[in-house]
Amino acid sequence: MKFSEIADHLNQKLVDKFVIKDGLDVLFVEPENLLEVMSFLNSDKSTSFDTLLCITAYDDKILGSAYNLFSLEEKHYIEVRVEVDRDNPIIPTVESIWKAANWHEREAYDLFGIKYEGHSDLRRILLPNDWEGYPLRKDFVTPEFYNGMPVPKDKTDWE
């Protein structure tokens, strides 16, 4: 199926649960609708999105998560995005639908501070437990020191 066919099919089944912005081939879903939309995309025989390729987070003045899904059976692909307020970035976990979401969501939490509600083990995965802040947010200020060690602000003199 092409993106437009998937969107039409989804709109017949889940009216007003997503929007398409700026002509992008992306479904934008509100956090409260995410589990319903993702469960449908996974279980519906016409869409059959059985594979979660990745989840990534982004900071474009608003924080968001982008989910890339693929159907092995139907050989089609879709991207679903959820955008949240940066002061209270909470998105339901999709771990119950795709187990692969576990580490992807932990990485997004660690680097962007997005909290995946209901996640089985939401803790840092890359940074030390005592690290403060979320370094991939655009408003992150690199600390001068971490545990008494200087933190370089650029890559000059790296060997």
Image: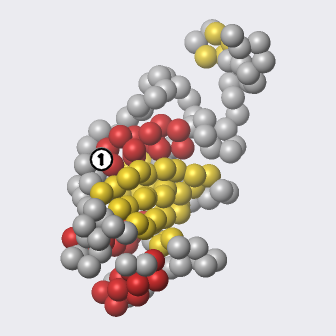
Residue positioned 61% across, 79% down in the render: 23
Q: Is residue 151 above or below residue 20?
A: above
Residue 35 in view here? no
Closest to the observer: 154 or 141? Answer: 154
x and y percent of residue 81 in the render?
Answer: 48, 64
x and y percent of residue 98 in the render?
Answer: 26, 54
Closest to the observer: 17 or 66? Answer: 66
Is 104 situated left or right of 113 in this image?
left
Is 43 situated left or right of 56 in this image?
left
Q: Secondary structure at mark 1?
A: loop
Residue positioned 39% across, 44% down in the render: 104
Residue positioned 69% across, 43% down in the render: 139
x and y percent of residue 48 in the render?
Answer: 26, 70
Q: Residues within 10 Å of mark 1 (few under 14, many from 20)?
A: some
x and y percent of residue 38 in the render?
Answer: 32, 67
Instruction: Say how the picture is coloured.
Output: secondary structure
Q: Quadrant of residue 31?
A: bottom left
Is 57 situated left or right of 115 in this image?
right
The residue to which callout 1 is attached is 100
Q: Is residue 21 above or below residue 49?
A: below
Q: Quadrant of the C terminus?
A: top right
Q: Quadrant of the N terminus?
A: bottom left
Closest to the observer: 121 or 23? Answer: 23
Q: Quadrant of residue 68?
A: bottom left
Residue positioned 51% across, 71% down in the render: 26
